[in-house]
Amino acid sequence: MAAIGAMSGLRAVPLARTAASAKQPAVVRAQAVMSSTAAPREVRLASSAFLAPGAIGLTRRSVAPVASRSSRMVVKAEAASAAAVEAAEPAEKDMTQTLKVSLYIFGWYFLNAIFAIMNKKTLAVFPYPWILSWIQIAVGAVFMLIMWKLRIFKPPEGGFTKDMFKALIPTSFYHMVAHVSACASYKFGSVSFMQVVKAGEPAIAVLLLSMFFGRKYSWRVWLTLIPIVGGVAVGSTTEINFSMAAFLCAMTSNVTSALRAATSKDLQADTGLKGINLYGGIAIVSGIMLLPLSLLVEGSQMGAAFAAAPALMTAKGTLLFGIWNAGFMAYLIIGSMFYHLYNQTAYQALGELTPLSHSVANTVKRVVIILASVAVFKNPITPLGQVSAAIAILGTFIYSVVVQQDKEKAAKEAAAAKAD
């Protein structure tokens, strides 16, 4: 009680007018410090209510620092927790993105390899590449129409317009010829040989784009064409079952594939189509264009071909996935779906990868298909053929790296010039 009285007395007298004692403030300060360290926070705050602001300032020097330290600790803890959450979220997103891209690439490789094998086996019992190509493209076109109708894939905004159809005609024509000639190459030669020749596509692209589209390439790009052209040339001449028809068809596919890539760059801006919707539009237009041509070339033989195919499948022991006797029509439709789905996953992978990463993935894909076809069909490849195929595919990879580096360098120079 005496201490409280003394404190209340001090509260009434300002410090400046208390000349009486230097001891009393010291004692009171000592008591205040002792109470602030020993008593709970609520008691310290309650006792500070007896002290008028400016009286002796005990609460500001004792209670306030404690409270501020606690506040800082809470703020730091909250900041650390928020930082941990923010750090975890990108890691989780990166993991999800990596898994998604991995699934796209796996699907692309798996579906393409299965399609290449099924396509070769289909052509062995149904040797009509024009009709077969149309069926494969048409199945994909119908599939896309169903997906758009069910809203599983977001349909093009405003629908599939007449102007959109017209804009797609050139690229769809090149797509049509590229696929028909590729199927014909499968008919006349081995899958591995066709893939080696297809590795020469970058060389064809550089030549065509330089001559007809005014593209300029660095000396490094031209240098990378040497292993590509050399590897394809040696690999072709050392092919045990070399077929000039297979070689010419594969080269035709290279030319039209390069033209398809060159003309498709402006399609996104002209049509508003992107990714799998762009491929769906190309499939629809090319399917419409290919139908009359395929009927003109092979239509007269179609009835007999469909009638003979089931017996030929049985004679050759062709089974779906090597275990199921599904019948010719089921085999044909499922193979056509593999064709569409491998193209779809390729477009989806392209949307998630950089151009360089996609080129690397495409290079590895050729190796996967060659190995898979050799394992299934047991077609022999000479040691020199193996080396030349490896050189051609490696040259394709180096070409992709150099082209991407040149693009990045040009972009930086353009940005620097714009900044100046």
Image (cartoon, rainbow, N blue to C red):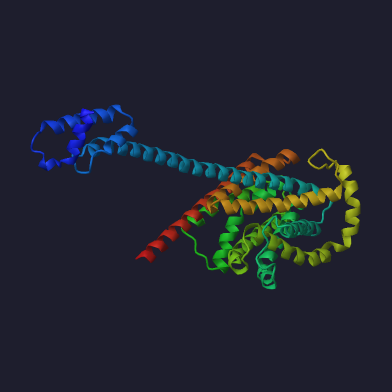
Instruction: Tell me where residue 282 appears, x and y as whole percent.
Output: 69, 63
Q: Residue at x 41, y 62 (%)?
A: 415
The structure residue drawn at horizontal position 58% and vertical position 67%, both measured from the top left corner, is 269
On screen, 222 above or below 360? below
In this rendering, the answer to whether 115 lies above or below 50 is: below
Residue lying furthest left: 19
The picture quadrant where one finds residue 378 is top right
- Which quarter of the image is occupied by the N terminus? top left
Residue 241 visible at all: no
Looking at the image, how many numbered discs can be counted on the residues?
0
Pinpoint residue 79: horizontal percent, then vertical percent: 40, 41
Q: Quadrant of the C terminus?
A: bottom left
In the image, residue 273 above or below residue 6: below
Closer to us: 140 or 220: 140
Task: Report the residue at 85% width, 44% height from top.
Answer: 326
Residue 250 pos. (x, y %): 69, 55
Q: Quadrant of residue 98?
A: top right
In-front residue for pair 220/261: 261
| In-image side of 21 versus 30 (left or right) | left
Does the image show residue 216? yes
* Image quadrant where residue 135 sits: bottom right
Task: Between residue 9 and residue 370, name the one nearer to us.
Answer: 9
Position of 338 relative to 303 (above/below): above
Q: Nearer the viewer, residue 384 or 19?
A: 19
Percent position of residue 297, x then y: 82, 64
- Say whether residue 376 is left or right of residue 68: right
